[in-house]
Amino acid sequence: MTWVLFPHWRPDVKFVLAVLLALLVSSAYADEDTFDTNKAIFVSLSDQHVVPYIDPDTDKIAGSVDVGLVPKQIEIASSIGKLLAIDGKGPLVNIVDLQLKTISTVPLDLVPSRMTVSSDGLTVALADTKNGHVVLLDLLRRRIVGTAHGLPHLRDMVFSIDSRKVYFAGAEAGAIDVMDALKGQLDPAIATGLPSGSLAFGRSPDGRRLFVQSDSGGGIGVLDLERSGPLAPIPAGPAATVAFPSATGAYLLVVDNQRGTLMVIRDGDAQNATVLKAATGVSIVYTGWFDTLALIPSVTAKSVLLYDLEVMHAAGEIPLAGTPARGGVTPDGQKLYLPLIDADQVAVINAQRRKLTESIAMPGHPTAIVLAGSYGVCH
């Protein structure tokens, strides 16, 4: 080795410096090797096999994982340390071991365009949404444990909180389909009390209620999952999104994209709803900081609207550098991470401080955020 930067230094000093430099370089790579991915924020990119992940303690990119395809969707099975990826083009799902960084490809008899992971992280439902074909995959044994054909065009699906059932929102008028995840077969459909098909689901934190968005008005359907039947729907306009329960279930939040309003229902009593001015271009509502704050991204306004849920007032607006896509709130409710598709950034909003605190540059176009979520705090 030739020492050109410090030609007059003694050899022993140079040796010590070399050791320190080596330690610094190795520690930069050791961070990725020793980082606990159970608390990571994973970011899918629209044009890359590589999925970077963020350390929520530093809001820096802590490393990345190759998922073996350009993902249409990624999901986390936190309990077993797996990252799942589909590309919407091939009849397969890639399962990445987050500790070993190895990829296992599971062939399927359908081309999945959507997937959802069970609450216990042991099963994934994969759907060809156009053709109404669904399979259930056991992630430990990597084998198919259930299948369903001939369902209506699927718009959304969600597991029950105990992972025993999977519910499917589809074009069938007035009902949703149900699969028994243990038996791997369809159960009788559940009436929604709505006059038309379903677009999306929202599930209460206690798992007892399922909120159903209609595709042509009729309000928001409310299903009692313990009794497998509908309750009185929540009155809402035809452009209303599904009811989003807050983290504790104390509030239901419904955005009307036609009227530009936010309806806040406290303790499930729709008779005492508060309606606030909001925005259009809203597809999801987040809550944070012990259910005191609602955060509503708008793609038309390119901003996040804030609402104080304790006093039921607007609490400001945070401009964004680009168009927001689906993000995620950390399980402690402190931070919202939002991918900005056309800015190659992830925006970090601190719910406690009610401000944008970081803009994390991404090596591509971010499309979605998935949180491993293993904080030991229920959000």
Image: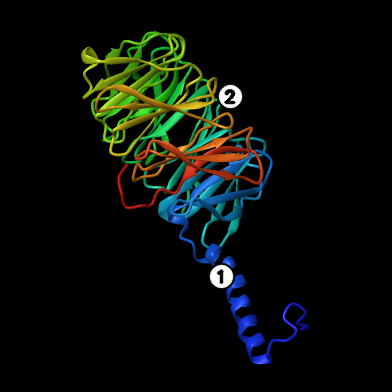
Total number of numbered labels? 2
Badge nearest the viewer, 2 or 1: 1
Residue at figure coordinates x 36%, y 43% from the top left: 334
Task: Measuring from the top left, give residue 173's x and y in whole percent.
Answer: 43, 12
Which residue was labeled with disc 1?
Answer: 27
Amino acid at the residue labelled 2: Lys
Mark 1 burial class by Cα count in 10 Å: few <14, some 14-19, many 20+ = few
Q: Which numbered circle lies on residue 12?
A: none
Amino acid at the residue labelled 1: Ser
What colour scheme was applied to this rendering of the protein?
Answer: rainbow
Which residue was labeled with disc 2?
Answer: 130
Q: Is residue 294 left or right of residue 270?
A: right
**Is the C terminus in the top left, top right, bottom left or bottom right quadrant?**
top left
Q: Can you see residue 86?
A: no
Q: Nearer the viewer, residue 56 or 227?
A: 56
**Is the N terminus in the top left, top right, bottom left or bottom right quadrant?**
bottom right
